[in-house]
Amino acid sequence: MFYPELAQMFPNLSGWNYLVETVAPRRQLVRKAIEEHQRTVQYDGHPRDFIDTYLQNIENTDDPNSSFHGEAASKKLS
């Protein structure tokens, strides 16, 4: 965790492979949920959950200093 480059040099010894194998399915599950929400979110309605709230904030933010503004906010969802 403190030295990712070193962990990647010795992936089995450091546990890097285990970490990647453990995180990948969860990340895929979350990505699928976000993509579904992006297709079905109602920006003028009540949010169903945290993902809707986040997407609505991205849509409604004009402040370039906000963490919900533009491409940077959208990339955080990936």
Image (spheres, rainbow, N blue to C red):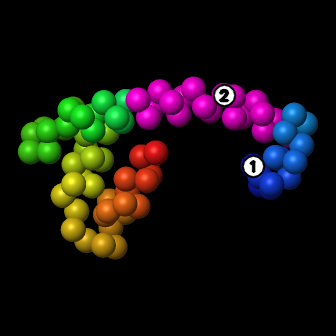
Q: Residue at x 37, y 30 (%)?
A: 33
Q: Earlier in the sequence, mark 2 or mark 1?
A: 1
Task: Name the quadrant containing residue 25.
Answer: top right
Horizontal side, residue 55 vs residue 34: left or right: left
In the image, residue 40 sits, relative to residue 7, either above or below, namely above
Q: Residue at x 34, y 35 (%)?
A: 35
Q: Amino acid at mark 1?
A: Met
Q: Where is residue 53? Give x, y as percent.
A: 25, 44
Residue topped by disc 1: 1
Q: Nearer the viewer, mark 2 or mark 1?
A: 2
Q: Is residue 42 magenta?
A: no
Task: Name the quadrant containing residue 12.
Answer: top right
Horizontal side, residue 32 vs residue 54: left or right: right
Magenta residues span 14-32
What secondary structure is marked by label 2? helix
In the image, residue 2 sits, relative to residue 51, either above or below, namely below
Q: Residue at x 27, y 38 (%)?
A: 38
Q: For the residues marked 2 and 1, what is the alpha-carbon distance in whole angstroms?
A: 15 Å
**What secondary structure is the stretch in magenta mostly built from?**
helix
Q: Nearer the viewer, residue 2 or 43?
A: 43
Q: Return the mark for residue 65.
A: none
Task: Name the quadrant containing residue 61.
Answer: bottom left
Q: Residue at x 80, y 54 (%)?
A: 5
Q: Where is residue 67? Give x, y as percent.
A: 37, 63
Horizontal side, residue 45 vs residue 77: left or right: left
Residue topped by disc 2: 22
Q: Amino acid at mark 2?
A: Thr
What secondary structure is marked by label 1? loop
Q: Where is residue 41? Give x, y as percent.
A: 20, 37
Q: Is residue 16 magenta?
A: yes
In the image, residue 64 sits, relative to residue 55, either above or below, namely below
